[in-house]
Amino acid sequence: METAPKRSWIDRLVDRVARLPVPWYVLALVAWLVLSSVLALPLWLDGSEPFGSYPRITRVDPTYLLGAFFGYGYLARYARRAFDRFRPALDVPDETAAVYRHRISTLSPRVAWAMVVLGASAAVLSTLTDEFYASFLTSAIARATWSAFALMAGIFPLVLTLIVKQLRLVARLHREATHIDLFRPAPFHAFAGLSARAGGMMLLWMTFAVLTDPAVFASAVWGAVVVAGIAFSAVVFLFPLIGLSRRLRAEKRRLLDESSGRIGSIRQELHRAVESRSFDSGGELRTMLSALSEDHDRIRRLSPWPWDTATVRGFATTLLVPIGTWLVTNLLNRALF
């Protein structure tokens, strides 16, 4: 019997924050104000910025950080709900299902520490060597404060690692599904929402970058980045669903073949009844043939796709957000400047 893995520090922290008797958006706003003030304070003290002013970077960087933290918690919670909806499709003991539910919403302690160390090291190195930060952080206290803040940037690899783990596990669960019933599609639509939200989160980060980085407006490179980001987000959405889509289409073909076979059998009996002038049985056979034809049409209308219309429509709309944002801001930049 499988045993549930240990919980990582990020998962325990997310759970503690979720249990606080305060709405998440209030917590996010308060945390953003605190972090922005902490980053701006050394700039006020060394006189590089007027007291009470918040340079753009002191407002933008905490937004990235908090977006990653609350995004991690959101994906973890949604993954648990999605697994609960998918559970009827799995023929496994409850203990095994509990392990799957745990794994799809958490990281192992070893992976979490490795990713946070990697991300924090890269962020601190960037802060200390980047020309922009070097010109912006003119005092030792400012460099120390921003380096300490950069340590928290290690959360970004955690979010990306969780997304990759979730998508791989979704693909595995789809392969292990045994109860495939096209007349009960809810379990097979469950994880489409998770993959759509993972891809949508990446698109929102990219859109935020477009809106907050003035260099984006005049950069043709960013146009290519936007297109590449959209393509990658589409892959994030589709990758874990492709295998299940094949199985659903195969199940639909099987149902149609069985239905066609029944219809063919009844037609032959009906023809024999007509030839033998057995009109009483012919009437019953006609009723059965009509019912089977209606059932065949009902099967043909069943969707073999592992998502519902609302999920696809919402994700498609999200795909257009970064392109629209980049085009509008680029046009406004040219018109105004």
Image (cartoon, helix red, strand yellow):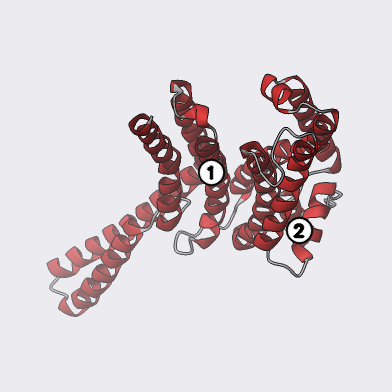
Tell me the amino acid under the disc marked 1: Leu
Q: Secondary structure at mark 1?
A: helix
Disc 2 crowd, CA 10 A, few/some/many (<14, 14-19, 20+): some
What residue lies at 39% left-to-right and 32% top-to-bottom?
333
Tell me the amino acid under the disc marked 2: Ala
Farthest residue toward the bottom? 280
The image shows residue 261 at horizontal and vertical percentages of 33, 56
Q: How many marks?
A: 2
Quick one: quadrant of the C terminus?
top left
Q: What whole-number distance in Å separates the C-alpha atoms at marks 2 and 1?
A: 31 Å
What residue lies at 63% left-to-right and 57% top-to-bottom?
78
Q: Secondary structure at mark 2?
A: helix
In this orientation, which residue lies closer to the viewer: 59 or 159? 59
Residue 324 relative to residue 92: left or right: left
In this orientation, which residue lies closer to the viewer: 181 or 84? 84
What residue lies at 74% left-to-right and 47% top-to-bottom?
37
Q: Which residue is mark 1?
A: 204
Q: Is residue 318 above or below residue 125?
A: below
Q: Can residue 91 be seen in this snapshot?
A: no
Residue 12, label in figure: none
The image shows residue 83 at horizontal and vertical percentages of 64, 57
Looking at marks 2 and 1 on the same chain, the residue that comes earlier in the sequence is marked by 2
Q: Is residue 176 above or below residue 180?
A: above
Q: Which residue is mark 2?
A: 98
